[in-house]
Amino acid sequence: MSLIEARGLSREFVVPKRAAFERTRRQLALHPTDLDVAEGSALGIIGESGSGKSTLVRLLLGLDRPTDGTVAIDGRQVDAAASARSLHWLRRETGLVFQDPYASLDPRMTAGRIIAEPLWALDIDGDRRARVREVLIQVGLDPAMADRYPHEFSGGQRQRIALARAIVHRPRILVGDEPLSALDVTVRAQILELLIELRRTTALTLLLVSHDLGVVQHLCDTVVVMKDGRIVERGHTSEVLQRPTEDYTRALLAAIPVIPDVPGRPVSDA
């Protein structure tokens, strides 16, 4: 059985009126969608802005209520309309890393308090200070940094703190919503290696929303390609990215910038 299972999942929104006498319009942000994610696997979700990637992820996490369809995590139905407390079981199963490490951390809280927040919110017993120290080491930070505030860290360090917060409660599913796009190239490579190591050592199931096909290729076993609220292609990452069957996927791949050869420029042997 799949760890994550979606059946007929769809989401419709009411489009705001632009004039007083305009008729109410509705728009399908996600057409009826089926999706299975095996435990321990890594799924990349790619597509241009507005393709439905974030809508799909929000529905899978119970952060939004579907217009139709169902989501089950390990066989248990997700009811997005349920109370926050009754969804504690789902929050314990999932961790989320956002795109912007500058906006996702509360500047009034120390790093240690930020990381420990899920432990308090989900009523997880145990030595919370010890767990924070443990997870700081796990993401490559000095435990002594727990008493510092976000403004005292670099962008890469902040994203490591965000990652520590996402895994401190030992979730089975880690979701990254463009977690590397706001970082420079060097830091991005470091966080990418950290995610690879976390997958290897913790058996996390990973859902990665990303415009960066190189990151998806490095991290993900399988990939789905989304366009206009529909999954238009899916399969093993290497197969889809190297031998796409859909014109839209080919167009995404063709849009990746390539540095042209410059006459007289030495060619590296690396």
Image (spheres, rainbow, N blue to C red):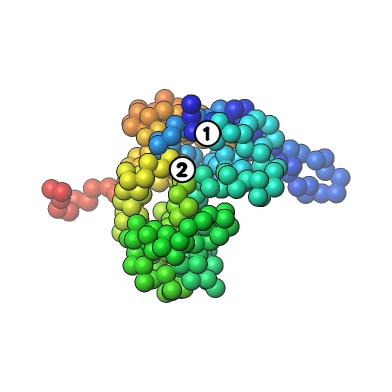
Residue at image x 34%, y 57%? 138
Structural distance between the alpha carbons of marks 1 and 2 = 10 Å
Residue 263 coordinates in the image, percent (x, y): 19, 50
- The mark found on residue 234 in the picture is none
Q: Say if residue 27 shows up in the picture.
A: no
Q: Is residue 111 above or below residue 208?
A: below
- Label 2: how many residues lie within 10 Å, few (<14), some (14-19) or many (20+)? some
Q: Choose between 129 and 9: the one closer to the eye.
A: 129
Label number found at residue 172: 2
Is residue 162 positioned above or below 223 on the image?
A: below
Left or right: 3 in relation to 18? left
Q: Can residue 229 be spotted in the picture?
A: yes
Residue 241, placed above or below residue 154: above
Identity of the amino acid at label 1? Asp
Residue 15 drawn at (x, y percent): 73, 44
SS category of the residue bearing label 2: loop
Residue 55 position within the rendered picture, expressed as x and y whole percent measured from the top left: 59, 42
Location of residue 234 (image quadrant): top left
Q: Is residue 126 left or right of residue 50?
A: left
Q: Depth check: give the residue in front, 119 or 30.
A: 119
Residue at the outermost right position: 21
**CB within 8 Å, label 1 to label 2:** yes
Which residue extends farthest front? 126
Which label sits on residue 74? Answer: 1
Asked whether 114 or 239 is in front, the reply is: 114
Q: Residue at x 37, y 35 (%)?
A: 221
Give the number of callouts.
Answer: 2
Q: Secondary structure at mark 1?
A: loop
Which residue occupies 73% across, 38% down? 26
How many C-alpha atoms fall within 10 Å of the one at disc 1: few (<14), some, or many (≥20)?
some
Going by the numbered disc 2, the residue's amino acid type is Arg
